[in-house]
Amino acid sequence: MSVETFVTDKAGLQKFYEAVMASRETYAPVEKFGKFDFKRVARVTECDPESPIAKTQSIKPLFFPRSAKVMKFVATSAGTDVSETDEDPLAVKRAILGVKHCDARSLQVLDKVYNWDYIDTDYQKRRENTVIISTRCDRADTHCFCTSLDYDVENLDALDVLIVNGSDGKIYIKARTPKGESFLKETVTGQASPVTDEIASPDLKKQYDAFAGSFRLKMDYKEVNAKLSKIFDTPEFENVSGNCVSCNTCAFVCPTCHCFKISDEKVKDTGVRYKSYDSCNNGYFTLMAGGHNPRPVKYRRWRQRAMHKFVYYKERFGENLCVGCGKCTIACPVNISIFEVVNQVSAAGVQE
Amino acid sequence: MEAEVKDQLVSIEKPELIAPPNWEPVIMGILCNWCSYAGSDLTGTSRIQYPPNIRIIRVPCSSRVDPWFLIKSLQTTADGVLVSGCHPGDCHYISGNYFARRRFLVTKKLLNFVGFHENRIQFSWVSAAEGPKFAKVVNKVTEDIKKLGPLHLYKKENFEK
Amino acid sequence: MNYTKEIQDIAAKLFAEGKIDVFVGYRVNGFDDNQVPVLITDPQDVSKLVFTDKSVFNLVNYLKNDHTRRKRVGLVVKGCDSRSLNLMLTESQVKRENLYVVGICCEGVVDEAGQKMQNCTDCMVPDAVVSDELLGTPSGSDTLSGSYKMNADIAMLAEKPLTERAAYFEEVFENCIRCNACRHSCPLCYCAKCCIDQETATLYNGANTTSGAFHALMTWSLHLAGRCVDCRNCEKACPSHLPLHLLHKQNESVIYENFQEHLAGVVTGDRGAFYKYSLKDPDDFIM
């Protein structure tokens, strides 16, 4: 696979962003109430592609919307007419600016489940038509732990285009995938000059080492995973989930949580069926029609959450579901860290 | 008042949504069984004309009106809401309308605070003997809401984010 | 304000006397100097407890929790927290005999940036109104008819024209992601099944639309009108950082100014402004 690299400067980067926005529908982090969320933008001044990782929501809603229309229905005297929804606004050709590494990784992980027994065509279409443009992280946040997990952050190829701030003051725009390469070829015209890949590489390596050294949270993933898979019945889950308030916001901000609920929204005789986020921390997430609830108490729901992230998904798809972004810890009103939870539980060991 | 209304129409409620010709408002009228509903009955039997824009729902008492009813009406069909009950002291259940009065004030102020014009949420006390007053109230509410134009804030029909 | 030692001693004493099964307090979170709640069941762990001006979260929320249900609980409450506890007691959600309440005469807490929280600068009830033991010096402020301080954000928004206010709130509701964290973190939202997410609801069923968020947040704030104690747990939980206090403070100011009511939860046995009336209530807005 040949990869193209362009070199430019600060002004050139702005021009590149403008060219991206001119060529495609562009989504980028936009600040609202001190929090950045990915929104449709038309000008560079509206957004901040280098938004701080701790304050930025994930890009999951651009692929798996917070509420997606499934179908429309109209009740008539003859029965109910069901029709397809309007065209999916997320399926057009688009580019996303300011994506973080962990977010890009989350798409790789989600691809597995969306290509599993049922192929989610909506998701596939959104994924195919999207070019992900990321700026390399240079410093880990308090709750980041992506380097401790089972994937290679340095050579992550889920990013189509990577922007690197070189130590020489130049900015390198690197294609990481064929899709990114062809996108760069059609978009970068005049603002940058192509260079060979080798120029950026040593610098890249040095930067990555500095980045990897800035992590507060580090763990031995293999050991934690192996231990966790054996300790389903440990009382430690009760201790670690003690101060959880079951507010569910961890699942809503998580870049890889993909549980959903179906709801009908109607006015008079017409309505729309929606697929919206749900959370396994909800007390009634597993409530069945007969009234039985297999996870009636909080620690069982937390166990499900932690084990799904670190054990079950790995067993089934070979990838760890948690990508180590720390978004759940930041959003959590009582700062429960999934990192601490899995470490504490696996350290407590098996109860005899 | 005129300028403010115009302003609201143009900037919040998108220009293309300004009242089409021959537009008639829909007003949700929530009336208490014992006074206002009987009062509206009297208006009819006395052959006093009032605008047909009001859609009447009968409730046992004005304190039966949950603020949620107002939110729900405004989000679905109605362009405005009128809630009417017995005069203070006349409540069939002794004190229902006193409780309701507190809720009404808080609901009205809150809805006004988040952007609904205060004339869209109106209250009145109409007794069973006040047929002409009921007609007057409905006339005034209809006129007020006609001036404001159709309501488009947070309407459910749009089904959009 | 530092009652770390006093609280550790009290908790140790309570465990030793066998008066409680679980103690709810604060501990340092382990990565910066902010604090998170901790539920202590093992007497060995009482040394984890701390209390300073970083002890922000309202612990009364844990009384509606699996870990404290049908148990004897020791609890630390500040002024605002004690008001919500008072309401929970009044609404028969917890039994007073199962609680050992450590009240704090609060001097105000600070947010993560180190700024004094807005609700603390406006606070009228800094001392715990329910307690078995009171730490600190009572401020002696008049909780029943002290001077009410209008929230600065409310005053600022109320002056704006209707259109600007509408545009502002449209943005608020648009940025809501309907995770319902505000509701779950509120100590007074204890319903087993909330009215805004019933399976058979006729109007909204939890899809994330702007109108749905409007509906949910308005219904929520009206259910808390006259009960909200302004502890700001909801804002702490909101992942979109929405200014949810605006809705509650607006209701609170209307109630305080128009009905000559004291603040919610100040008097034991008082269910809030909507459970009583006065013949002198304003009538001029009604035709």
Image: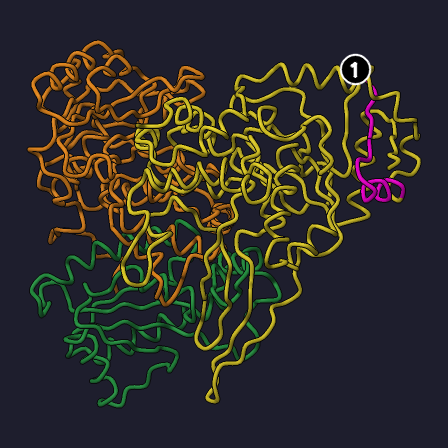
Chain colours: A yellow, B green, C orange
- Residue B131 location (% of width, % of height): 21, 80
Residue drawn at x 17%, y 72% is B60
Q: Amino acid at mark 1?
A: Ser
Q: Residue at x 59, y 36 (%)?
A: A31
Inspect the magenta stretch and tell me whether residue B140 lies in it: no
- Between C59 and C124, the one lying in front of the other is C59
Residue at 31% across, 34% down: C150
Residue C155 visible in the shown view: no
| Looking at the image, residue A189 lies above or below residue A223 | below
* Residue identified by numbered label 1: A167
Q: Which residue in the rendered view is the most extreme toward the top? A: C5
Is residue A180 found inside the magenta-colored segment of the image?
A: yes
The magenta segment is A169-185
* Residue at image point 49% right, 26% down: A224
Q: Which chain hosts label 1?
A: A
Viewport quadrant of the N terminus of chain C = top left
Find residue A342 and report its image quarter.
Answer: top left
Image coords of residue C157 (percent x, y): 43, 41
Q: Position of residue B158 (x, y in %)?
A: 53, 65
Residue A279 to residue A268: above or below: above
Q: Between A242 and C156, which is closer to the camera in this rendering?
A: A242
